[in-house]
Image (cartoon, rainbow, N blue to C red):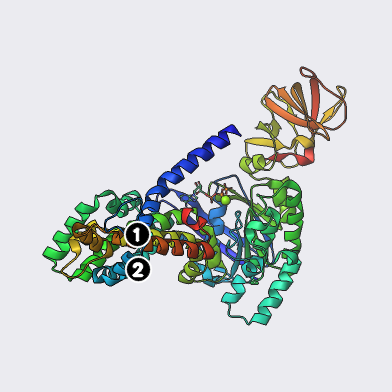
Amino acid sequence: MKKGGFITIVAVLVFVFLMFPLVIIACTAFNTAPTISFPIQGFTLDWFKNVFATESFIDGFKLSFTLAIVATLLALLVGVPAAYALSRFSIKGKKFLKNYFLSPTIIPGIVLGYALYQFIVLTLKMGVIEGLLIGHFMVVLPYIIRVVGSSLEQFDFSIEEMAWTLGCPKIKAFFKVVLPNISSGIVASFMLAFINSFNNIPISMFLSGPGVRTLPTALMNYIEYFYDPTVSAISVLLMIGTILIMVLVEKTLGIGALTK
Amino acid sequence: MAEVRLENITVSYDGKNNVLEGLNLKVNEGELLALLGPSGCGKTTTLRVIAGFIDPKDGHMYCDDRDFTRIPVHKRNFGLVFQSYALFPHLNVYENVAFGLKLRKMDKVTIEKKVTEILKVCDLTEFKDRLPKNLSGGQRQRVALARALVIEPELLLLDEPLSNLDAKLRLNMRVEIKRIQKKLGITTVFVTHDQEECFSISDKVAVMNGGVIEQFGTPEEIYTRPKTEFVARFIGFENFIKLHKVDGVLECADGTKISVDDSGDKDECLLTIRPDDIKIVADDYKGENVLCGEVVVRTYLGKSYQYETMTPFGKVVVNDASGTLYNTGDKIRMVLDKAKIVLV
Ligand SMILES: Nc1ncnc2c1ncn2[C@@H]1O[C@H](COP(=O)(O)OP(=O)(O)OP(=O)(O)O)[C@@H](O)[C@H]1O
Ligand SMILES: [Mg+2]
């Protein structure tokens, strides 16, 4: 009993510690003072209005959102079959391949960003959007392979073989019995990949071009010139967005899907 | 319903060592063949070759004289039950069973009729809306069986389907499988390493060892007349005595004469007999095939006592149900039942 009480206290403390900055930021978003400060002096929604009035935020959001969706979908298209092949077949050099696919998560983002800048922008002279897409694709692919891969490790492939014996051709069997049983892994990998792409700064910083900014780079740019609570307002909006997505996932799959 | 033949099947997983070595096997139409053998002897591999999961390095498989070697798994129409059952976790019992029928583009009414029927046969009607994770081991096993049977397969392949069940359920399911198999007249290959299960269920038995078939025959033949020492050991012959021929008569190492119906043409052979087929007799017993030994270990088996005895030519194990107790160190005389002696 005593031990249980102690753990509860620690849990509450950790929770408070994690929540504290978020609460402060949320409060400052409604502050009338022109700089981010706490405690707040008065209540206003002006900063939220400012968010929607600032074109670079709206454009940045649109770009980040589209980029994250497209890059993640592309990565799913490549990553799911790759993860499947890695866990289904005994390929020579499997370990090497696995590590290779994960290497972008180990290299610092700045280094990867700079390398991509050298290659995509300077050598290949690609367009900004294409460059960003390739960069983000590379950043999110390891998450997909990793998370879907660990889902597939749990999957009993005799289930797939059973579908074959019942008359199901291989490709169809993949969609009918493999996919439904790793769907939670796919959703989890999608969320992780989406969030990582959406929040990414180093890659976007190197690959952005004139007039093309993702939301985080637009935010960074804004903070360099202004120190007003508009950024807090954006944070609140993003938090609300995240909570909505979580609720949606919880309603459809159960939140356990993300931790499995 | 079909007749299945394997001809010279050779399989290797790593390209170097052959797991199956020139294996030949024939299952007649409507028969239940049991593949019996110790762990790792290649039973599952044989089954996977028949099912089409493994491309043999060499050899052919025929189904009703059609060469099936290159036919992909999904076109074979064989029903399969794995040891792990491999039910579809995301589908309920009804959908699991209906899976194969839906792929055959049948109309809804026919599917429903067939599924309902087979669920009834397998005693699963009340569970049809449950997910596999909410079923007991025995129920899962029946779902796996129903799913394999409902597609009316040419051939039914069962890989140790009873090994996850408790003893009582095993017995029930064994009888059940046999009943359904006979009723539908479906050719079946049943993999097991349990000899009792094997003999009670099968029409034919193939005993496997190290990737080859050691002996093939009816359960009675295998049970009473094993052809090799390996088969004999595997099916419960515990006594092995070296014999050699002196003037046409078989003798043990110490000169004890052994009389058998057919002494064969080899000069040296191995006598084998089950502990149940040896009797302990009184000291004044006059007759053939009598051995003397000293009791080393006594074990209580329930319906009888088992005595491990030491003779001049090695260990002899005898089961005695007479009720007379012998103690360690006692000298006893044992007679071998002439009709039950097997030479390998
Ligand atoms: N995928 C595989 N890769 C390499 N070797 C394998 C593979 N599957 C089986 N083997 C080997 O092939 C041999 C035969 O295996 P198999 O599974 O056919 O045995 P089994 O008779 O079914 O045994 P058990 O009674 O334990 O199920 C074993 O030595 C095993 O180690
Ligand atoms: Mg096996």
Q: Nearer the viewer, residue B45 or A211?
A: A211
**Secondary element type, mark 1:** loop
What is the crowding at mark 2: few (fewer than 14 residues within 10 Å), some, or many (at least 20)? Answer: some
Q: Nearer the viewer, residue B120 or A59?
A: A59
Indicate which disc residue A29 carries. Answer: 1
Residue B234 image position (x, y, % from top left):
65, 42
Q: Is B182 on the left or on the right of B35, as rendered? A: right
Which quarter shows the N terminus of chain A? top right
Residue shown at 41%/47% (left/top)?
A: A18
User: Circle 2 sits in a helix, a strand or a loop, which is it?
Assistant: helix
Image: B135 above or below A213: above
Amino acid type, callout 2? Ile
Q: Which mark is residue A202?
A: none
Instruction: Pinpoint residue B238: horizontal percent, then vertical percent.
Output: 69, 35
Q: Is residue B219 left or right of residue B45?
A: right
Residue ID at (69%, 26%): B315
**Residue of label 2:** A69
Where residue A136 sits: x, y (%)?
28, 62
Name the side, left or right, on which B42 lies relative to B119. left
Find the distance from the CA under tag 2 to the CA under tag 1: 28 Å
Residue A187 figure quarter: bottom left
Q: Is residue B100 left or right of residue A169?
A: right
User: Residue farthest to the left?
Assistant: A122
Q: Nearer the viewer, residue B45 or B130?
A: B130
Circle 2/circle 1 CB separation < 8 Å: no
Q: Is the CB of mark 1 within 8 Å of ligand 1? A: no
Indicate the amino acid at tag 1.
Answer: Ala
Are discs 2 and 1 located on one and the same chain? yes
Tag 2, which chain?
A
